[in-house]
Amino acid sequence: MNKNKKIAIWLPVIIALSLALGIFIGNHYLLLNKGFRQIYSGNNKISTILDIIDRQYVDTVNMGNLIEETIPKIFSELDPHSSYIPAKYAEEVHDELEGSFSGIGVSFNMQSDTIIVISVISGGPSEKAGLLPFDRIITINDTVYAGKKFHQEEVIKKLRGQKNSTVRLGVQRGSSPKLIQFDVTRGEVPNYSVDVSYRVSEGIGYIKVTKFARTTYNEFITAIAKLKQQKCTGFIVDLRQNSGGYMDAAINMINEFLPDGKLIVYTEGKAFKRNDVYSNGTGTCIDAPLVVLVDELSGSASEIFAGAIQDNDRGLIIGRRTYGKGLVQTPIPLGDGSELRLTIARYYTPSGRSIQKMYEMGKVEEYDMDLYNRYMHGEFDSADSIKIADSLQYKTSTGRIVYGGGGIMPDLFIPRDTSHFTSYYINAHNSGVIYQYVLTYSDRERAKLSSFKNYQELYAYLSKQPLVEDFANFAETKGIQKRPGLIQISYQLLKQQLEAYIIRNFFDNNGFYPIFLKDDVALKKAVEVIKDGYWDPKRK
């Protein structure tokens, strides 16, 4: 059979097979594309895309990791305060505001790659086990944690754990090279949010609130009761650097100062109708003079507190413009232990002000630069640098003009006190050498320093010691060159901070704050306006 005959016989077969294959392939892709069109017509496009990747992507993909990395990117396109909390971090976030956590009951610092116990909580697990201040924790569950670079957060995770679980610590005490082994049974450890309360001047009590946690209100009224026993009739509430927390805690605290029927705050959102919160008249300090201290790091619940006091003309706000966070987040737990913090409403002060500063959806980095821009613009140093449109004017209960548009503007502006700042001090502070020196000095002089009965006696002793000179010698060994002229300018600031931090190692915050805030300009002004009667905005 010649070549032409073979072609004549097989050509129709080849064409038929080609047509059949073409029809099959065409129908296959038609069905496939039809299926895709049907899938894409649904609302859950993200789930669809992830499912397609899981089934058809060229390589095997860890879908769990892909989802965990995708969710934060979705939230990054919302407002700056909506967030996703992975399961591994959710418990830590809750511990911060719940008022207690399960741990061993010590505060510590990482000094030269060694965990040094600074204080042991009275009645806590570590005290019961026999740990002492300035013990060095060398091993945790037989793993060496000395001489290695560990983040403080990693050490915290190792020391915390389930209640009634046990952690084995290898501790070096004093100069003995032999480790002492302690088996510490973890238990509930209080996580205080009212750092300190004390009588700052005759008849005037000072209360430092660092966050609004589950237990804050109870801590607060306990502090008020203690100060009243010390004959305090006026109060200074310090909310500086308090970034917020539970709104209910702030509302309950405000209620202590307002008469019955005063609007405290209201919230409103797309899916949430306006909700007004009023005082009920059961407060214990309704007529007490009140000053609230705020700064650029006072946010959220702190601004609710300051805004309610200001708008009701109940007290004086002193300091600098607050952060400007007026969005309400609700926690939404997910099945795997992770959590959404979704913005559901805005809160407004009694005069109708929204404290939330301006933001653009999805531009979190620009939003985060706001404080830096305010600093560069000179806002922390001069009230005149703050320009707010007249359209953002509101009126308090007595007709005083206040401003919205981002944060609470104080009634009395207090600039940053940088009079003792020098490049030497900034270098020493930022490098951590001040804290290193304090730990070294406290450990070296432990026998003497622990012999004093109260912080006042210890302060009287420290005030006569050449701490700044000794510190300068120590800092030089850490690479910070002596600068006599700059040290002299910063001398008083260095001396006060060294004294305060050393005292904290032996008398905790009760001794620390009275020394650390001894020359605080805002606190001095607060005392002055209460004594002179100018704390009352209604006074003409």
Image (cartoon, rainbow, N blue to C red):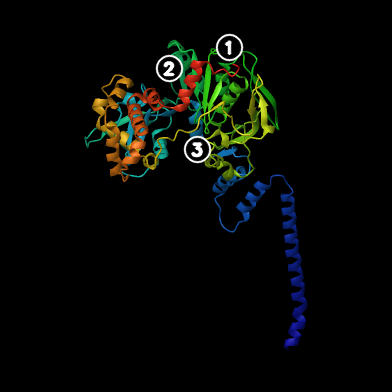
Q: Nearer the viewer, mark 1 or mark 3?
A: 1
**Disc 2 designates what residue?**
201
- Which residue: 55% across, 33% down? 383
- The dot on residue 168 is none
Q: Is residue 193 visible?
A: no
Q: Amino acid at mark 2?
A: Ser
Q: Amino acid at mark 3?
A: Tyr
**Disc 3 designates what residue?**
89
Q: Residue 228: image x %, image y %?
A: 46, 12
Task: Say above or below: 148 vs 131.
Answer: below
Nearer-N-terminus badge (1/3): 3
Q: Residue 230: image x %, image y %?
A: 42, 12
Q: Residues within 10 Å of mark 1 (few under 14, many from 20)?
A: few
Quarter of the N terminus within the rendering: bottom right
Q: Residue 511 lies in what quarter of the image?
A: top left
Estimate the spatial distance between the alpha carbons at disc 1 and disc 2, rounded to whole Å: 27 Å
Q: Nearer the viewer, mark 3 or mark 2?
A: 2
Nearer-N-terminus badge (3/2): 3
Dots 1, 2 in contact, CB < 8 A: no
Q: Residue 51: image x %, image y %?
A: 64, 50
- For the residue pair 238 and 32, the one nearer the viewer reads as 238
